[in-house]
């Protein structure tokens, strides 16, 4: 068994092996170099295996590879190592990997989306690389700033009066009307009593569990929101229905919050109950001027983005059992968002003391 020995080393091979032996970033190359150098020092293969923490058969295989192919026969690269021999990643190859990852998978592999495993399989099948690990492929994509992105929906407004309405609303956003207070109005909901998934800090192996809700007999609620562009405040009551009657009551509630002498330019969408005769009559007699968003262009209403934050910080990762509890959470968020309370609701030391005593 010890008849398998490394051949005589050439001067440049000895220098290269001594350099590989001290590599800290590539333990495989370091181990292979030690095997060859120990073999040239007349060390038995079994003893070499003990010192290099491997089997004698593996020592003999490495020695055979060195004798046949020299240093290239035992050199291992974590990026690129296949039956055609070890290679190195070049800039052109990483650019090509990035180009393939950004290409449409439907045309290349007949599937609707890439995954790291399928991308690696395609790269190997096309002989772009001979071998690559999933982790290294992920690092290459990350280095080239190629990350997963969720697709988003987009509605293009086809309303014939889109541009006149758009310019009218942009002028309102750019400058406050004299003697007026700009307000954005919209409804948020329906708000069900159901478990909502979300994210939170947690240690490995522990996540919050939420119950399944098959029956929801308590109905829904709607938040009628009003965003004041001047004061940067978001307010609004909750109602069990969304119709012309509840909207008119909400409009009266908003009007009472401002002096009668002020004109209220209000931005809102084209919901049917927003255009009821009672609503339009009340607006005409109480200094309210409506700015209607174009069809399929609710993104022009600035309250929409504030509803996104409300959903994240008041509803995500929750499991409210009653509408009163859900309303209280929404009110807590609105009071913090409107700078009416500090972020702290309970002293940390008191909470920690009670938690330990429980």
Image (cartoon, grey):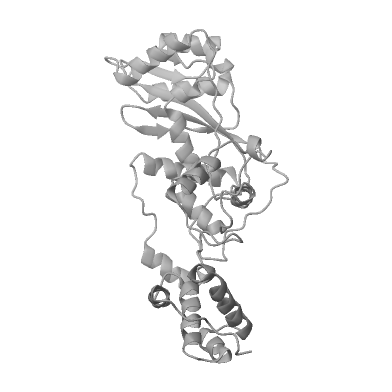
Image: 8 above or below 123: below
> Can the viewer see residue 253 in this picture?
no
Residue name at image x 64 percent, y 38 percent: 108
> Can the viewer see residue 100 in this picture?
yes
Q: Is residue 52 left or right of residue 122?
A: left
Residue name at image x 55 percent, y 41 percent: 100
Residue name at image x 39 percent, y 78 percent: 18
Q: Is residue 267 left or right of residue 124?
A: left
Q: How many marks?
A: 0
Q: Quadrant of residue 14?
A: bottom left
Give x and y (percent) for residue 150. 54, 40
Q: Residue furthest right?
A: 214
Image: 49 above or below 326: below
Image: 265 above or below 41: above
Front residue of 279/196: it is: 196
Front residue of 62/301: it is: 62
Give x and y (percent) for residue 143. 43, 50
Front residue of 236/266: it is: 266
Specify the quadrant that holds the N terminus.
Answer: bottom right
Q: Quadrant of residue 30?
A: bottom left
């Amino acid at each position: 068994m010890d008849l398998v020995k490394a051949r005589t080393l050439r001067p440049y091979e000895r220098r290269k092996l001594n350099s590989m032996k001290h590599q800290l970033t590539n333990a495989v190359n370091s181990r292979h170099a030690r095997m060859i150098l120990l073999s040239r020092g007349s060390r038995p293969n079994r003893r070499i295996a003990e010192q290099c923490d491997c089997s004698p058969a593996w020592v003999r295989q490495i020695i055979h590879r060195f004798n046949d192919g020299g240093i290239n026969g035992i050199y291992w690269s974590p990026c690129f190592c296949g039956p055609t021999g070890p290679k190195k990643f070049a800039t052109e190859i990483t650019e090509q990997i990035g180009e393939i990852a950004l290409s449409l998978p439907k045309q290349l592999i007949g599937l609707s989306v890439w995954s790291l495993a399928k991308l690696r399989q395609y790269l190997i099948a096309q002989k772009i690389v001979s071998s690559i690990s999933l982790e290294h492929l992920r690092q290459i994509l990350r280095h080239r700033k190629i990350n997963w992105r969720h697709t988003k929906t987009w509605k293009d407004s086809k309303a014939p009066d889109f541009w006149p309405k758009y310019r009218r609303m942009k002028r309102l956003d750019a400058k406050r009307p004299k003697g007026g207070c700009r307000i954005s109005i919209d409804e948020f909901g329906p708000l069900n009593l159901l478990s909502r998934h979300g994210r939170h800090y947690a240690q490995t192996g522990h996540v919050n569990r939420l119950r399944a809700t098959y029956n929801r007999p308590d109905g829904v609620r709607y938040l009628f929101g009003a965003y004041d562009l001047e004061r940067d405040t978001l307010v609004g009551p909750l109602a069990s229905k969304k119709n012309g009657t509840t909207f008119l009551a909400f409009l009266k509630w908003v009007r009472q919050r401002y002096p009668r002498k002020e004109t209220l330019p209000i931005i809102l969408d084209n919901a049917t109950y927003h255009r009821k005769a009672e609503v339009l009559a009340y607006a005409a007699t109480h200094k309210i001027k409506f700015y209607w968003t174009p069809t399929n262009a609710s993104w022009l209403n600035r309250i929409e983005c504030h509803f996104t934050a409300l959903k994240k910080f008041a509803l995500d990762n929750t499991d409210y059992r009653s509408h009163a509890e859900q309303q209280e959470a929404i009110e807590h968020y609105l009071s913090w968002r409107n700078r009416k309370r500090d972020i702290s609701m309970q002293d940390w030391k008191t909470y920690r003391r009670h938690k330990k005593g429980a």
